[in-house]
Image (tube, rainbow, N blue to C red):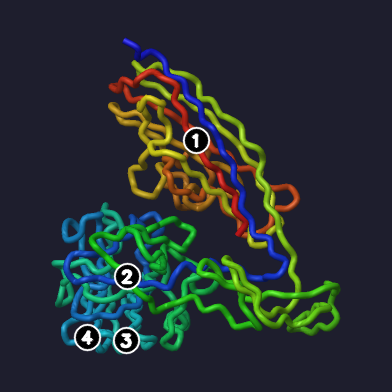
């Protein structure tokens, strides 16, 4: 019998990333321009549970679609499995080309007719204050609306999940899997104004989601560009980490709504990024030489750049004026040891680590953590602790727990700049503005998780972020003895 004591050590690797170009003012990552292609047979995309982001049942969601045939565009689910439990289609195109919307259990609203194999935008809006369901098709508000009290799955003990393209037995007249393309799906927990919805349509060009500008800067729950180009995970561009999952043999094709930076003199670009403007300058003074109630003009001594300069990484042409670089730093890493514990009886072992991040970047920074392996904590001979799995996917557990036959390894971040996902309202994580001690527990994965975020400079003092580690063994679990090690990678990125 060698199941006596186990020792644990966590090795921390620190990385920091920053972009310091004296010739740019706006740096925007732009992956590809893609949309999801649905075959009308058995593929669909599904969000995680979004219930924690809704305090009321007020909601707006918008989507671009190009239909080849009738089918369900958006469905509401109360669980991960479609067409079971709670399910109802909420945006649908019929064989006639009529587009209908609804929320449960109100009557549907007809938004009008569209042609197949052309791009269209539809927005569903439900206002809790007025109890009115209405919608917009290609920037035009529906002629009629429906008055009534919506019933949402999260209000009835279910999850709050949206699915794109999935067949639904509770439908608006079709219920079939969607056949066509879908792009730019966005969900808010508020009722958008008419002008905001018209802005989304953008005269038929669409508006590429950016959480720093309206209407994406308020009430944003989840948003998807579908610009990954491959894979089964679609990234949520909000700060909420609500990445979606593609099911079935789905394809990525050329999309409709694209990032279109303003044309200000010139651009620096590659397949990975776009810089709106650049500069070739010397001298100059950063003081006001002309001002009014509307602007302040800063001078520069230089000239417009002409011609092109390029490498395998970028192309540069033209310019305006020089800009300041920025820096980011993170304190040194230390190995963290958790106290040993018996593998024959239940118990817990706890430790923590802190990092100081400083940046003068006006856009702020974020900290990401990930494990080098899955599971994160294990021995060289293959014994391991399970990565902690919250009871609700993508939402940390307010209270830590371990099953009687389980052993698990968890973490909880704390600090002034903790991301919304790890804040709480005293009962639930991902809601409220509290950073309650020893709450909001999550598990490591090999994909980076944003644990801290700040949208401004913290120079010169910086900000400290703590991570608390916990291992636990259930009452009926016998854990193999050994030296358990986890390599955690902590990355600070200037935004």
Q: Earlier in the sequence, mark 2 or mark 3?
A: 2
Checking the image for residue 98, the label placed there is 4
Above or below for 312 versus 70: above
Q: Looking at the image, which residue is at 41% across and 35% down? A: 400
- The residues tagged by marks 3 and 1 sit, at their Cα atoms, a distance apart of 55 Å
Q: In the structure shown, which secondary structural element does the residue marked by tag 4 occupy? A: strand
Mark earlier in primary sequence (2, 4):
2
Where does label 3 land, which residue? 142
Circles 1 and 2: CB distance less than 8 Å?
no
Q: Please rate how many residues cluster around mark 2, counting C-alpha atoms within 10 Å: few if below 14, some from 14 to 19, many from 20.
A: many
Tell me, yes or no, if residue 208 can be seen here.
yes
Of the pair 164 and 381, the residue shown nearer to us: 381
Q: Residue 487 carries which label?
A: 1
Q: Which residue, given by chain and number where applicable, does mark 2 sit on?
A: 36
Q: Residues within 10 Å of mark 4 (few under 14, many from 20)?
A: some
Q: How far apart are marks 4 and 1 (CA)?
A: 55 Å
Q: Distance between the residues labelled 1 and 2?
A: 36 Å
What SS does tag 3 mark? loop
Q: In this view, does 56 lie above or below 488?
A: below
């Amino acid at each position: 019998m060698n199941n006596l004591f186990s020792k644990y050590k966590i090795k921390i690797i620190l990385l920091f990333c920053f972009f310091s170009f004296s010739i740019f003012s706006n740096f925007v990552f732009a992956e590809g321009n893609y949309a999801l292609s649905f075959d009308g047979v058995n593929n669909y995309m599904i969000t995680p549970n979004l219930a924690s982001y809704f305090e009321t049942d007020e909601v707006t969601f918008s989507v671009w679609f190009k239909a080849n045939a009738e089918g369900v565009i958006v469905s509401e689910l109360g669980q991960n499995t479609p067409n079971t439990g709670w399910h109802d289609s909420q945006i649908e195109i019929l064989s006639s080309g009529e587009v209908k919307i609804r929320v449960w259990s109100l009557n549907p609203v007809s938004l009008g007719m569209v042609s197949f194999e052309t791009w269209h935008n539809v927005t569903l809006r439900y206002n809790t204050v007025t109890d009115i369901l209405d919608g917009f098709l290609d920037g035009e508000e529906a002629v009629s609306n429906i008055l009534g009290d919506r019933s949402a799955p999260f209000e009835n003990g279910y999850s709050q999940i949206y699915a794109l393209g999935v067949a639904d037995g509770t439908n608006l007249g079709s219920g079939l899997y969607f056949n066509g393309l879908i792009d730019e799906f966005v969900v808010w927990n508020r009722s958008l104004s008419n002008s905001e919805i018209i802005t989304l349509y953008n005269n038929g060009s669409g508006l590429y989601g950016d959480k720093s500008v309206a209407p994406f800067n308020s009430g944003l729950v989840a948003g998807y560009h579908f610009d990954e180009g491959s894979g089964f995970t679609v990234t949520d561009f909000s700060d909420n980490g609500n990445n979606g999952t593609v099911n079935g043999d789905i394809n990525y094709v050329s999309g409709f709504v694209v990032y279109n930076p303003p044309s200000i003199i010139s651009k620096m670009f590659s397949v990975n990024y776009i810089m709106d403007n650049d500069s070739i300058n010397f001298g100059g003074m950063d003081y006001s030489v002309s001002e009014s109630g509307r602007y302040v003009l800063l001078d520069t001594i230089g000239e417009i750049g002409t011609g092109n300069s390029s490498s395998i990484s970028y192309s540069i042409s033209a310019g305006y004026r020089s800009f300041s670089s920025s820096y980011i730093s993170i304190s040194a890493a230390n190995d963290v040891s958790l106290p040993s514990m018996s593998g024959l009886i239940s118990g817990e072992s706890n430790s923590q680590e802190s990092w100081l991040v400083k940046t003068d970047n006006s856009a702020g920074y974020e900290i990401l953590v990930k494990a080098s392996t899955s599971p994160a904590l294990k021995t060289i001979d293959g014994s391991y602790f399970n990565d902690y799995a919250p009871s609700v996917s993508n939402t940390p557990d307010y209270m830590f727990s371990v099953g009687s036959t389980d052993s698990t390894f968890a973490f909880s971040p704390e600090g002034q700049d903790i991301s919304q996902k790890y804040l709480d309202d005293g009962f639930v994580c991902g809601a409220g503005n509290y950073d309650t001690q020893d709450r909001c527990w999550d598990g490591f994965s090999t994909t980076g998780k944003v644990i801290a975020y700040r949208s401004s400079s913290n120079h010169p003092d910086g900000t400290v972020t703590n991570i608390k580690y916990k291992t636990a063994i259930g009452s009926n679990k016998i854990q193999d003895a050994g030296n358990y090690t986890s390599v955690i990678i902590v990355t600070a990125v200037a935004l």
